[in-house]
Structure formats: C-alpha cells, structure tokens
Image: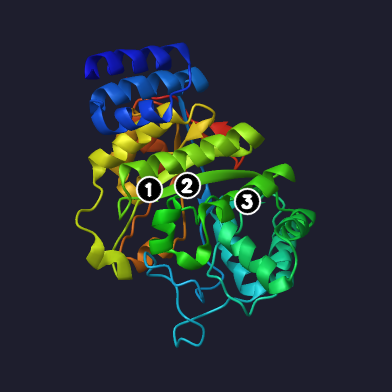
Amino acid sequence: MSIICSEAIEEKVLSGARLTREDGLWLWQQADLLELAHLAGLVRFRLNPELCVTFVIDSNPNYTNVCTTDCVFCAFYRKPGARDGYTLTIEQVMEKIQKSVDLGATTILLQGGHNPDLPLDYYVTLVRETRRRFPQVTPHFFTASEVTTMAQVSGLSIREVLQQLKDAGQFTLPGGGAEILSDRIRRRLATKKGPAEAWLTVHRQAHELGFKSTATMMFGHIEEDEDILTHLDHIRGLQDETGGFTAFIPWSFKPGNTPLQKHIREHAGPTRYLRMIAFSRIYLDNFPHVQASWFSEGKKTGQIALHFGADDFGGTLFEENVHAAASFINKTTVDEVVTLIQESGFQAAQRTTLYEILRTFEPVTV
C-alpha cells in the first residue's frame, strides 16, 4: 500500500493537483525525507522559478512585556505589576525604530504582551508616527491576539480596530500567535487566546480590508501529527477564501525558562524542521512563499532548508527579545545573510514585506 500511495502522491504533486488530508498525513508520517525534499523543490520552482532567495532587513522590538494571557510556552511576558514589567512610550519605540532604520531596515515587526492598560490610541499612534517619521518603513505590527486585545479594551469590533490601524497607515500583519491552530492544543498552550477561529477571524477580516499577512506555526511541543494537519488545513482553507497570506513561517518551540519546559520529552531537531519545511511547501499549494529560519533553527539548518522547498531566508532581526528570554540567541548581519544564501547556491535578493525585490546581489559562481 505504501508504494501505491507514494506513487499516487508523487503523481499528484507533479501534476499540480491538491493533496487530501489523508495524502498529507501519509506524506508527513511515512515519506522518505530526501523524497520530500525532491518533491518540495519541484513545487518551489514551479511557484518561484528563479534561482533566487529573498530576505528582508528588519527588526523585532517589543513595546511591552506586560501580559495577562499566561501562555505556558512563553518566557518573555510579565504579569501586571511585576517588578521587571515594562511598557515603552511612543518616543522610546520611535528611538528603537530609528536605530534599525540607521542599519537599513525597511520592515519593523513590532509585538508585545496583551496589556489591558494600553488604549487603542497608543497602538494607532505607533503606526501613524512610524509612517510619518519613517516613510520607507513598513509597520508590520501586532499579532492577531494583540488586535483582539485592542478590541476588548476599546469596546470596538475587530474590524473597526483593523480599520483604524489601516487608516493610520498599516497594511500588513505578522502571523504570530497562531501556535498550533488546533483547539485541543490551544486549550493547553494558551487558553486565554481562544480557539483557532479567533486567530483565523482576525486574519480573515484583515484580508477583507486589504491587509496582507503571514501564517506561522510553532511546533515541537505537545502537538500530534493530526494537529499539524489541522493547522495547515485551516490556513490553506483561509488562503482559498482570501488569498491574503504572503508566506508560511514554521519554527520549532524553544523550551528554555518556560512553564511548558518540563512537559517536553524531546525537542524538535533539524530533521523534523526540514521535514516540516518540505512537507508544508508541498501541502500549502496556494502559498506563494515558505520561509526558512536561520534565526530559530540555526544558520546551517536554515541553509539546508533552502534545498527543502524554502525560497525565503527571513529577516536580519536586529533586535529580538522573545526567543532571547528562552535563552536562545542568534544574530547576523546583512552581509552574512547574503553570504549564507550564496554559499547555498542561490542568488540573494533583498525584498520588502510584500516580497517586492529592492535589490539583488551578485550571483554566486560555483
């Protein structure tokens, strides 16, 4: 049966036909890793024919670590009133953005905790001031759960909050907060974030208003194989509806200093990550891009992922605090990112948040 299934799935991939959930489960559980890489490469070059890998010059500062959501996988947040809790002023956030702009950043991925003391005007002003002071920067701000918190605090609907952010100059959303879009898992990881539909609703409404967004997945904790398929089915289905996702970005859970740490039997290593990159590239047939993460998985694994279906190398992340709170720190420079891509046999290209090419670098000669 496995031979027949393997041949049938390969035929579907080669013809561009959509894989069923049953196909996907077999592929995820049974397929040879290198065969997955081969099939993922075919899909990658069908969607992005050029021998080009993109990256964005960006930073990921945080405006507050105060949060009432109590996610068991997070080492970053602090409860209201905590001695080491903080909330930056608008000016302090602008100073952080200025430092990144001085290094060439064109995207700022701004995130924080769910702080009930912050009014909606704080968030809107962050967007408006970023646009006014740094017109070359895309404010890639606020995850779905942060938008939900804004709605709860302000008494407005999610759509009304998104409209205010859009009016201030925001047109993209990061995909953070998805974790695993399986209600069974979300009840254990982040009960207060609500079911999968809570995340999907924010992105659906954002897409309907003209926003583009990314979809993420944090795996390698307590999920089962069926939960991974449920997550991918959710985002593939929403992409069918709206076409609003630009990329899929998976990363493995970092357990350091988190309440969930003691419940993890085995960390998801490079092999499982590469399987995820290749499998998602095949299964998410309507996603333009899949991002490799040098940051969360290590630079060598990130390079290898470019041969497993990924066509994007993420960002420079000049500042990042959430993984650092879990004792996982990885840094790079623009020159190193270009070198890593070129060493992998691809041409490096700097992009915008929306995957528009800003400049290409001299192609590597092999």
Pointer 2 or 3: first along the chain: 3
CA neighbours of label 1 inside 10 A, class few (<14), some (14 to 19), many (20+): many
Q: Residue 174 appears at what percent x and percent y?
A: 56, 51
Per the image, the residue denoted by label 3 is 201
Q: Position of residue 9 (x, y in %)?
A: 36, 18
Q: Quadrant of the C terminus?
A: top left
Q: Which residue is mark 2?
A: 216
Left or right side of 286 for 299:
left
Is 283 situated left or right of 92 in this image?
left
For label 3, the crowd category at 10 Å Cα-Cα, with few meaning under 14, some 14 to 19 and many 20 or more, is: some
Q: Which residue is mark 1?
A: 251
Badge 2 marks a residue whose secondary structure is: strand
**In the displayed structure image, the side of residue 329 where residue 15 appears, left or right:** right
Tell me the amino acid under the disc marked 2.
Thr
Residue 359 lies, with reference to residue 73, above or below; the image says above
Q: Residues within 10 Å of mark 2 (few under 14, many from 20)?
A: many
Residue in view at x 56 percent, y 52 percent: 197
Residue farthest to the left?
265
Residue located 49% across and 26% down the image? 285
Residue 110 can be seen, yes or no? no
Amino acid type, callout 1: Trp
The answer to whether marks 1 and 2 mark residues whose Cβ atoms lie closer than 8 Å is yes
Dot label at residue 48 = none
Q: Tell me the SS state at disc 3.
A: helix
Q: Earlier in the sequence, mark 1 or mark 3?
A: 3
| Real-space Cα separation, disc 2 to disc 3, in angstroms | 15 Å
**Residue 158 appears anywhere in the view:** yes
Look at the picture and state if 5 lies above or below 178: above
What's the distance in space between the residues labelled 1 and 2, CA to CA?
8 Å
Q: Position of residue 2 (x, y in %)?
A: 23, 19
**Closer-to-camera residue (157/14):** 157
Q: Secondary structure beneath disc 1?
A: strand
